[in-house]
Image (cartoon, grey):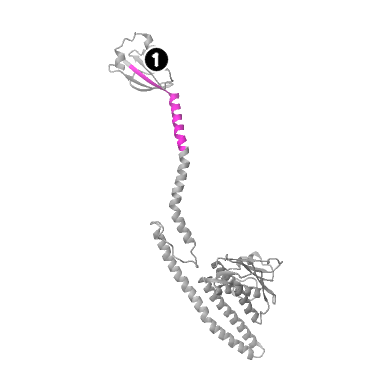
């Protein structure tokens, strides 16, 4: 084009130049065609009629308002200035930024949601494995199901299963030792207690009789402790759930009948049955009898001497209530701990409520300790909430 302009007569028809310079729209790039003397031969519609204040040299140059690129014809007689206004460049930058910003504003939340879904789905097996591990305790040592886990997590599940196997063997050995020890101790303790009672009956009143009486008391406490250890071992072995449904009311009546046949507790345990039928649950008979005996023993021992103990049967609940002072929060905090005994001079091992809580949890129930007892200004209440039948 520049070579063609160089061969044209620059003093030609001014009207044709005006038509060339005439533009209908705003121009973002303007141009000027100059001769070797710097005179404007032709310019675009929005370009000024006077030459831009830049040298006639090839390359980029800056003026106060424009960024200008200069090019020349092959013989160097015609020059072309192409100018880009700085305000147009800033406007283009703003428009480009806005054009990029809106998609980003929509893309960022969508990316966050997509990443959250992908990461959550990827971490779901880990969360499932964590939940399975969290359920393991002394009463649940079943191995984890590693076949459904991703290949990367299967070694972890196998390692946990090996650890559970070792723990199960250790716990079983401990429980077996406790059960065997308690079982084997009962016979010699009973024999020693019988001989001491015989000796006590033959001794005349005096220091020797008092010493024999203390021996009798110690042997009785040791016998009860052996019995509690045997019950604790059975509770830890998970005897709570039974193979078939039983009527718990019949079990409670049998246990209370045993206390009525004992001259020391006859008539002290009362039964209040508020149900109209049977109380059927899938619970082991021996386990529920252990629960009731421990609760009634505690009520008899820690309540006022010769005071009555009430066993109330409701719709899905069993309550054992005795009199006595109101327990403090400090006493409540330690009641279910093993070998913990409150401020009492009564005989006991501190294992009864721990055994009861473990068995009740195994059957899916809940035990609540309340003081003062419901509907009374004093006393103590142990309430068992049974699982739905």
Query: In the rendered image, which quarter is residue 22 located in?
Result: top left
On the question of residue 347 being in view, the answer is no
Residue 342 left/right relative to 226: right
Residue holding disc 1: 21
In the image as oriented, which residue stretches furthest toward the right?
377
* Residue at point 49%, 61% (across, down): 134
Dot 1 alpha-carbon crowd within 10 angstroms: few under 14, some 14 to 19, many 20 or more? some
Residue 270 location, quadrant = bottom right
Figure check: 62 above or below 154: above
So how many labels did they put on this image?
1
* Viewer-nearest residue: 247 or 20: 247
Give me the residue at 47% from left, 61% from top: 133
Q: Which residue is more in the foreground, 194 or 359?
A: 359
Visible residue check, residue 130: yes
Residue 80 or residue 321, whichever sits in front: 321
**Quadrant position of the N terminus in the picture:** top left
- Secondary structure mostly seen in the magenta stretch: helix
| Stretch in magenta | 79-104
Q: Quadrant of the C terminus?
A: bottom right
Q: Is residue 134 above or below residue 5?
A: below
Q: Residue 210: image x %, image y %?
A: 65, 85
The image shows residue 58 at horizontal and vertical percentages of 33, 21
């Amino acid at each position: 084009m520049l070579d063609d302009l160089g061969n044209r007569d620059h003093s030609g028809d001014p009207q044709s130049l005006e038509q060339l310079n005439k533009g209908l729209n705003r121009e973002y790039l303007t141009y000027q065609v100059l001769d070797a003397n710097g005179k404007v031969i032709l310019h675009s519609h929005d370009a000024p009629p006077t030459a831009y204040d830049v040298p006639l040299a090839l390359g980029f140059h800056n003026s106060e308002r424009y960024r200008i690129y200069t090019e020349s014809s092959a013989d160097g007689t015609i020059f072309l200035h192409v100018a880009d206004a700085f305000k147009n460049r800033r406007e283009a930058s703003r428009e480009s930024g806005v054009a990029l910003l809106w998609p980003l504003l929509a893309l960022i939340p969508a990316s966050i949601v997509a990443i959250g879904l992908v990461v959550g789905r990827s971490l779901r097996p880990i969360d499932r494995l964590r939940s399975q591990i969290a359920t393991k305790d002394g009463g649940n040592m079943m191995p984890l199901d590693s076949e459904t886990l991703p290949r990367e997590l299967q070694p972890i599940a196998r390692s946990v299963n090996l650890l559970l196997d070792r723990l199960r063997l250790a716990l079983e050995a401990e429980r077996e030792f406790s059960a065997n020890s308690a079982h084997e101790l009962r016979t010699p303790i009973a024999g020693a207690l019988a001989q001491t009672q015989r000796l006590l009956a033959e001794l005349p009143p005096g220091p020797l009789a008092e010493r024999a009486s203390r021996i009798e008391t110690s042997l009785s406490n040791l016998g009860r402790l052996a019995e509690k250890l045997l019950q604790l071992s059975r509770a830890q072995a998970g005897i709570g759930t039974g193979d078939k449904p039983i009527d718990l009311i019949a079990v409670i009546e049998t246990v209370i009948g045993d206390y009525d046949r004992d001259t020391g507790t006859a008539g002290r345990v009362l039964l209040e049955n508020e149900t109209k039928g049977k109380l059927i649950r899938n619970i082991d008979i021996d386990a529920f009898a252990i629960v009731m005996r421990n609760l009634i023993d505690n009520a008899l021992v820690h309540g006022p001497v010769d005071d009555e103990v009430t066993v109330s049967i409701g719709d899905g609940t069993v309550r054992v209530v005795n009199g006595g002072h109101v327990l403090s929060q400090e006493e409540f905090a330690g009641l279910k701990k093993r070998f913990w005994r409150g401020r009492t001079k009564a005989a006991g091992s501190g294992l009864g409520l721990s055994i009861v809580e473990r068995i009740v949890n195994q059957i899916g129930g809940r035990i609540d300790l309340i003081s003062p007892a419901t509907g009374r200004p004093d006393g103590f209440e142990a309430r068992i909430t049974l699982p739905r039948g």
